[in-house]
Image (spheres, rainbow, N blue to C red):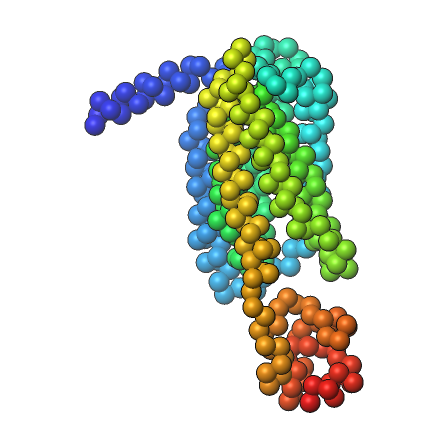
Amino acid sequence: MAQLLNNLLDLYNQLMLKSDQRVNDWPLMSSPLPTIGICLTYILIVKKIGPYFMKDRQPYDIRIPMIIYNFLMVIISAMIVYYFTAYAWFKNYSFTCQPVDYSNSSDAILIAKTSYFYYLVKFLEFTDTFFFVLRKKTNQITNLHVIHHSLLPFSVWWGMKFVPGGHATFFGYINSFIHVIMYTYYGLSAIGPHVQKRLWWKKYLTVIQMVQFVIIFTHAFQLLFVNDCKFPKIFALWIGAHGILFIILFSNFYDKAYNGKRDRKPQSALANGVSKLDPLLTMCNGTQHKLINDSHKNGLHKIDPIDSKSAKKMH
């Protein structure tokens, strides 16, 4: 056993010698262990510590922090898109094969720093889940959500350590572009119901997230058929594998969240009064009503207001 551990340690040390030496002294980049520790702590907080802390507490009203955070994320994501656009993908990068520039040129260092910034932002995105915990929205802390947030910092660390530039930056480029759209939606939604009712495109957020991973997968895997490309093919496989994983996870989520609703049999709306209606808004005789508890003693429950003519018909 001791010999096996020594061999693994030697293999690890040899592997680290092949990493990009420019980033070795940057915070969190000397070893993957700090990143792994942070990701595991995140999982522990959102799955155990957070729900336990909130168990006997009322949900916190954090609408203002949510608005600030989401629009801050729009700005941050847009900055990443700008730098990858202006100094890489629409400057001199090739979409079919782009090796990493390991030099100390100004553009190469700028792209490495932008990649590093993207890596750090993955930790900031943990805030999404912390908001769910504080609002007691445990139904939104899905396996997809936790896997997505906890896996990406660890995955991006390896890209940052070995290929902080070149073909690998396309993942962060497309992902940040999608996040501009996504956090714009979340920021507007956090403003309140008067804005939420105009946000008809929530369903399509999941669609564009799936599309992004199809694009990322295609962009990465096409390198396997370019024989003379000097970008490491192992990272093409690594990035492409993430594309496949998230296509599957997001597809399953979409199917359950949207297609599943169509398959549910509607409950009887009128059985000693209307009860257990969902969602929070329903349509009655063409009029939209808010659902509240026991609004009508001998008949309708959870619907208020209701016009008198409809009420007479119900009795």
Residue at (43%, 26%) from the top-left corner?
31
The percent coordinates of residue 30 (x first, y second) are: 46, 23
Q: In this view, does 140 lie above or below 162?
A: below
Residue at (63%, 15%) from the top-left corner?
108
Residue at (60%, 16%) from the top-left corner?
98
Q: Answer with the quarter of the image where residue 87 lies.
A: top right
Q: In this view, does 141 lie above or below 85?
A: below
Residue at (53%, 64%) from the top-left corner?
57
**How many numbered marks appear?**
0
The percent coordinates of residue 72 (x first, y second) are: 69, 41
The percent coordinates of residue 236 (x first, y second) are: 51, 23
Q: Quadrant of the N terminus?
A: top left
The percent coordinates of residue 253 (x first, y second) are: 54, 50
Viewer can see residue 26: no
Q: Is residue 29 above or below residue 75?
A: above
Q: Quadrant of the C terminus?
A: bottom right
Viewer can see residue 40: yes
Direction from residue 175 to residue 52 in the image, left or right = left
Residue 273 or 196: which is nearer the viewer? Answer: 273
Direction from residue 159 to residue 185 in the image, left or right = right
